[in-house]
Image (cartoon, coloured by chain):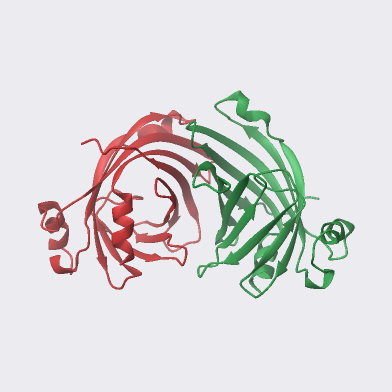
Chain colours: A red, B green
Amino acid sequence: MKIEQFVAQSEGEWKSMRSSHSLAFQQFEQVISRIKIKLLNTNDSKVLDLLYESNYSEMEVVMPFSIEWEAESDWSEEEELGDKATSGSSIFVPIPSSSEEGVILRNLGYAESIQAKSNYHFMPNDSLMLNTEYEKTIAEEQIWFASKNVRFRSSVVRISGTEGVLQASFASEIKQNILQT
Amino acid sequence: MKIEQFVAQSEGEWKSMRSSHSLAFQQFEQVISRIKIKLLNTNDSKVLDLLYESNYSEMEVVMPFSIEWEAESDWSEEEELGDKATSGSSIFVPIPSSSEEGVILRNLGYAESIQAKSNYHFMPNDSLMLNTEYEKTIAEEQIWFASKNVRFRSSVVRISGTEGVLQASFASEIKQNILQT
């Protein structure tokens, strides 16, 4: 089960350098943040809450986890871009349909701050591909490990029903030695 | 032959937003540049020069091309990082071994400014993966189209023989309407 290995390898504290490109306005944004990825119990109330309104059962869930993030600094070129939350957290509930693919329920989406369901699959090189349809946008994310302690994440956000790309971003993430709780 | 479609779709003038992450120093660099991708004849002297010292023949070459780039602006955080050439050009000579993979000869590498040979293959989602071994480093590049006029490029540079990652970069490229020669 690849999603198990992927989540196990992701668990811990990461330092993230993220660059975002706004394609229409040719604006850059860059942020350093700390990210904590923690495993949750399948019967955690936050996991059960997400399942409650879905068609999935607790039995199908594999290694649910939470991600907490906190921005350390932001060298945004334009102050107006700085209106994003500088900290937050989200719950992720993977539900595999095979060893290579499945869905992940999230209580807080990436492109829009709403509950979301992502389809995922693994590429031959073990990159995790995530596709999430929101109300107005579609996010395509790719996450891959360069080594045990370095992972990369690219995200492309499109306008639903068009080929138009709103924003792309890329994060380099380095694992910190000890998970500080 | 996927490389033919890929090169054909890449031909033209692109505006590129590129962000680089220096992992060891947690430094960002961002550059806007213009990129011109032009098809070359197989019997162009620059193509023949590259073939001359290789084990490949003119008959094996498919759609050679040149890339010229010119930086428009650079908001590098650190002036010391700004020692890279702000313009340049390179010749690319694809030599497929099957419809999905092969090698690309370059007269100027990405990670090191030396002649280089990249192995390439296409992923199931048509992303082009390039792997280039230089003298001291290995570059892993991924290039994919989000639409006819938008492509993305991620690059990870490692130290040869280690898992250490020196630098990662990500470029968002938007096709300009007319190829200005």
Residue B91 occupies quadrant: bottom right
Image height of A95 relative to A39, above or below: below
Q: In this view, does A44 lie above or below B159?
A: below
On the image, which quarter does residue B47 sit in? bottom right
Quadrant the C terminus of chain A occupies: top left
Q: Position of residue B6 (x, y in %)?
A: 65, 65
Residue at the location (61% across, 24% down)? B79
Q: Nearer the viewer, residue B62 or A118?
A: B62
B39, above or below B75, in the image: below
Q: Can residue A57 be seen in this view?
A: no
Q: Is residue B123 visible?
A: yes
* Residue found at x 59% / y 66%: B121
**Residue at 29 percent of width and 54 percent of height:** A8
Q: Which of A70 and A168 is in front in this view?
A: A70
Direction from residue A129 to residue B146 in the image, left or right: right
Where is residue A53 drawn, in percent x and y? 15, 62
Give the left or right position of residue B75, taking residue A57 as reference: right
Counting from the top left corner in percent of width and height, residue A158 is at: 45, 56
**Observer-nearest residue: B112 or A22?**
B112
Tell me if B82 is positioned left or right of B44 in this view. Answer: left
Give the mark count. 0
* Furthest-top residue in this view: B79
Q: Nearer the viewer, residue A180 or A96?
A: A180
From this viewpoint, which residue is outermost toward the front? B161
**Residue A142, image x, y percentages:** 43, 56
| In-image side of A113 versus B56 (left or right) | left
Quarter occupied by the N terminus of chain A: bottom left
